[in-house]
Image (cartoon, helix red, strand yellow):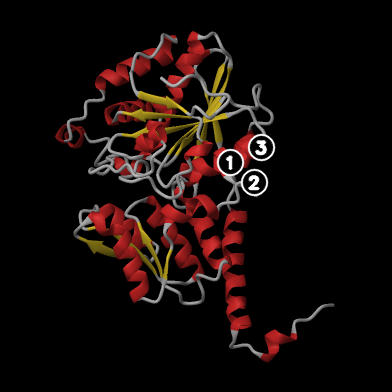
Amino acid sequence: MHTFPFRQHNPAGPAYRRGWVDEAVAAIEADQCRTADTHLIRLIVPALSGIDIYLKDESTHPTGSLKHRLARSLFLYALCNGHIREGTPVVEASSGSTAVSEAYFAQMIGVPFYAVMPRTTSAEKIAAIEHYGGNCHLIDDGRALYAEAAALAARLNGHYMDQFTFAERATDWRGNNNIAESIFTQLQGEPRPLPDWIVMGAGTGGTSATIGRYLRYRQYPTRLCVADVEHSAFFDCFRSQDRSHVCDRPSLIEGVGRPRCEPSFVPGVVDRMMKIPDAATIAAMNVLSRRLRRPVGGSTGTNFLALCRLASEMRQANATGSLVTLICDSGERYRQTYYEPEWLKARGLDPAPFEANLSSFLATGEPLTLAVDDFANPQSARSPEAT
């Protein structure tokens, strides 16, 4: 039996701190073991016979969104790199689902958590973060979000998690139960187990990077389509191959779209991008919610609209195959926004025409007529011509 006497000789030194890290990692891993994998739902659309549509339901995570995976990966990455030790305050720049999920894991391992967010953040979001013991640090100028988060971490002698930089490297893209591996494992018994496309929105860019890298590593023929939104820099960065693009307005669709091309966005693994109008996002959210008989969030609408455009192209080409996208979170979080007609009206959003077009497509298979900005990666051998 091997023993480690240095732990006995110096319990207050680095080995003792290593012991706490071991316990923290074990707690996070145990939480994952208690949680079943999220469902892969097959959406039955008789009008699209021969085209199978699957929805990976990330809303069933303990904190209710896809960001639960990101937060878990970020905490494990920070712990295993020595950035978080016993009592280390953790700081993040987020007012949304990432902050909720990071607060959950911070509470689990017993470290303080601070979310830096604009003062205009809704009371509901603040309450969700505080529910898990998080602290909300409100600032007046949202443009200073990143700088203030870094400064607060320095003042607290803490760790700035920086999801927008580390999302693409915190997850093991080769496998180890990442979302891409999970999708392909769950598809193994399906009629068309290798999807033609996986559709993913971009918030940090980390999940699309994981999926794109995994597809290449496994040499799968599946292509990656990233759906962007209005008031976001990602699409222009992808089309121009210039990361300096910025947008002077924030995205209305929570969880996707950023005013700058975030460091975690890896355009080289993306085969195609679409820029979805916000009204079309809301329309797709409504249509899918009715089909599922439960509300989904706005970013899921963005994903679903892009998927339906791909399905429409396949239908017109008499092609068969399968398509996969994500349910990122539940629509219950957006009852006062995306599901509130007055909120939409105040922002000039009218989803009705898009809903009619999308509903008709799903009912009859007639082509979608919705026009969106669309660009294919010219370096992708399997990509269609840029449009």
Residue closest to the eye, 71 or 146:
146
- The tag on residue 213 is 1
Q: Which residue is mark 3?
A: 185
SS type, badge 2: loop
Going 33% across and 30% down the picture, which residue do you hit?
A: 281
Residues at badges 2 and 1 in contact (C-beta under 8 Å)? yes
The disc, 2 or 3, on the residue closer to the chain's N-terminal end is: 2
Q: How many marks?
A: 3
Name the mark nearer the viewer: 1 or 3. Answer: 1
SS type, badge 3: helix
Kind of residue at disc 2: Arg
Does 318 appear above or below 198? above
SS type, badge 1: helix
Location of residue 219 in the rendering, given as x and y in whole percent from the top left corner: 67, 33
Kind of residue at disc 3: Thr
Residue closest to the eye, 184 or 251:
251
- The tag on residue 174 is 2
